[in-house]
Structures are given as structure tokens and as C-alpha cells.
Image (cartoon, rainbow, N blue to C red):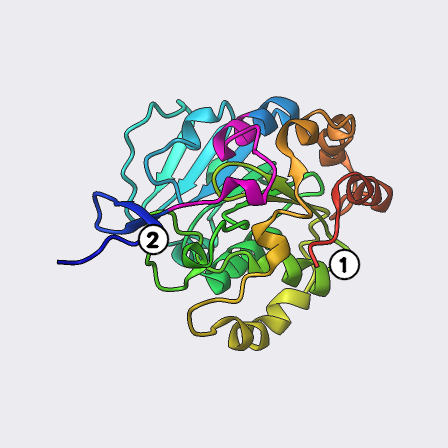
């Protein structure tokens, strides 16, 4: 007869262990990821919304914009917006098309939510592809960047809540692309990363991709920094939404040129970037 582990409080319907989480390690999140995403829809009023990894459609139903959702096997159970295209392809297949954003009618994605395959190289590839199609006012949100336990961060799924090693993108973007501005946000359950200042002409990440992937593919268990577990550099979700700079982000859509003005990127960085090391 097996003895239950004190670290496991149950088993999911899919057969994955549900690990106990010590919520004393980090500030209590005041919003879930979808509440935060809904707040971004309110402050940004996006004309276009792109979601990678739609699952049941909880993110898609928040949108009032022209919307594209990409997922090879969506399990949609929510009410979807009227003006939507659901693409049943992998993100690589989708971005490989010359007409990937044709449904947007020539408008770049104003808001993007990346919640696809939970492996760092996949999330990085999705970000690279999004940046290639971005406008000066594009805002990207990456999900699952703050695992609460090492088990959640495993590359091979072994828990009900699974972030994979997407947390590695936090340092990659800050180290390799200091021209971007990144805000970690303390959302429930496993954190968000907001990125602005995208530059479609940048070749830095595509050029470094193979080198980065070689370092990303490390055997489990993953080495998750204590600062990530404790969410040391993460911003409160509501305070992030109350920032008075969002109207300027919206106005950046009308900028002549490929990227957000540098002063606005610096303003965002000054408001939200904190060290996670």
C-alpha cells in the first residue's frame, strides 16, 4: 500500500499529481491571468487580437476586437466573439503562411496572448514570429512565466499545473533584447510577462535561436531561480492596469515607422522592470 506524499494533495482527472503550493513564498495575486487579460483589453481597446493556444476559449471570449485564435486542437466551450477566425493549425504552420494575418485586413496585431506549447523554444519561436508581424503599438503577453514549484516547470509534464520552462524567456528577452521593455506581472496561477517595443526588423533572436535552443533543452528537474518562485520582480496586476501610460501605448499605433518611440519604451521600463536575479 502506497503512502500519499505530503507534497501532493490529489490527482487530476488526467492523472497528474496536484502539488501543494506554499503561497507564503510570494505576494497574493490580486487577479487571475484572464482577469488581467480582460483588463488589458479595456485599457488598450485593441483593434485586433491574436491568441496562440486557445484551449477552451477563455481568452478569446474576452475580446471585442477582430480576433484570430490559433490552436491545432481547440476544445472551445465558451462564447466566442462574432468577428473571429479560429485556425486549427500549430503556430509554426500558421506563421509559415504568407497570409497568416489576412483576417486582420492589413492591421497589425494590437494585443497578442502567447499560451501555446509550454516549452521555452516553442514560446520563443512564437515571440519571434509575432515580432516579425508587429506594429509600433503591439503589446505581447506571455503566460506561465512564474512557476510556483520546480515540478510545474518540468519540460516533460508531470503535474496538473504545468508551465514548462517558459520562465527562461524572461532572462532571454532582457539579456538578448535590452531594447525591449518587459514587465513581469503577478497573476494567478503562474504569472504573465508583458512586452512592448517590438521591432519587426530585428534579427537578434532569429540569428541566435539555434544557439539559445541548445542551452534551453536541459534535462529535468529544471533549475528555477528562487527569485522566480518568490516572484521577486513581479508587478501587482491591478497596479499595472492603473498605469497612466497605456493611452500613449495606444497612440503609438499611429506612429510613422516600424517601432514604438524610444521614450515610451523607457517610460514603460521605468514603471515596471525590476530585477529577477
Q: Is residue 73 left or right of residue 262?
A: left
**Residue at the image point whose x is 30% and y is 54% from the top:** 5
Position in image of residue 24 (x %, y %): 55, 41
- The answer, for residue 120, to whether it is visible in the render is yes
Give yes or no for residue 53 being in the magenta stretch: no
Up the image or down, 123 lies above or below 212; here it is above
Disc 2 secondary structure class = loop
Q: Farthest residue in the right direction? A: 263
Tag 1 residue: 178
Up the image or down, 270 lies above or below 2; here it is above
Tag 2 residue: 159
Question: Alpha carbon of mark 1 to alpha carbon of mark 2: how far?
Answer: 33 Å
Up the image or down, 147 lies above or below 59; here it is below
Q: Is residue 189 left or right of residue 42?
A: left
Looking at the rendered image, the disc whose residue lies closer to the viewer, 1 or 2, is 2
Position in image of residue 184 (x %, y %): 64, 45
**Residue at the image point whose x is 21% and y is 50% from the top:** 15
In front: 109, or 240?
Answer: 240
N-terminal-most mark, 1 or 2: 2
In front: 84, or 45?
Answer: 45
- The answer, for residue 46, to whether it is visible in the render is no
Position in image of residue 260 (x %, y %): 77, 43
Q: Is residue 71 left or right of residue 163?
A: left
Q: Look at the image and tell me in which quarter the C terminus lies.
A: bottom right
**Residue at the image point whose x is 60% and y is 53% from the top:** 228
Number of labels in the image equals 2
Magenta segment boundaries in residue numbering:
20-38
Amino acid at each position: 500500500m502506497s503512502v500519499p506524499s505530503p507534497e501532493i494533495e490529489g490527482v487530476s482527472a488526467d492523472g497528474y499529481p496536484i502539488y501543494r503550493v506554499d503561497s507564503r513564498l510570494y505576494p497574493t495575486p490580486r487577479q487571475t491571468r484572464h482577469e488581467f487579460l480582460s483588463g488589458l483589453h479595456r485599457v488598450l481597446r485593441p483593434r485586433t487580437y491574436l491568441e496562440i493556444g486557445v484551449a477552451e476559449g477563455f481568452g478569446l471570449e474576452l475580446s471585442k476586437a477582430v480576433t484570430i485564435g490559433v490552436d491545432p486542437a481547440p476544445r472551445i466551450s465558451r462564447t466566442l466573439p462574432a468577428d473571429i477566425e479560429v485556425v486549427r493549425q500549430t503556430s509554426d504552420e500558421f506563421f509559415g503562411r504568407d497570409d497568416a494575418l489576412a483576417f486582420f485586413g492589413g492591421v497589425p496585431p494590437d494585443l497578442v496572448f502567447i499560451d501555446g506549447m509550454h516549452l521555452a523554444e516553442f514560446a520563443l519561436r512564437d515571440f519571434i514570429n509575432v515580432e516579425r508581424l508587429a506594429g509600433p503599438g503591439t503589446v505581447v503577453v506571455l503566460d506561465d512565466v512564474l512557476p510556483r514549484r520546480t515540478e510545474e516547470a518540468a519540460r516533460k509534464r508531470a503535474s496538473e499545473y504545468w508551465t514548462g520552462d517558459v520562465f527562461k524567456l524572461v532572462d532571454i528577452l532582457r539579456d538578448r533584447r535590452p531594447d525591449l521593455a518587459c514587465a513581469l506581472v503577478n497573476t494567478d496561477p503562474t504569472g504573465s510577462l508583458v512586452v512592448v517595443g517590438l521591432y519587426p526588423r530585428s534579427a537578434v533572436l532569429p540569428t541566435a535561436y539555434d544557439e539559445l535552443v541548445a542551452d534551453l533543452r536541459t534535462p529535468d528537474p529544471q533549475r528555477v531561480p528562487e527569485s522566480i518562485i518568490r516572484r521577486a520582480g513581479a508587478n501587482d496586476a491591478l497596479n499595472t492596469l492603473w498605469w497612466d501610460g497605456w493611452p500613449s501605448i495606444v497612440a503609438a499605433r499611429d506612429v510613422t515607422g516600424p517601432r514604438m518611440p524610444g521614450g515610451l519604451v523607457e517610460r514603460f521600463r521605468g514603471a515596471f522592470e525590476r530585477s529577477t536575479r
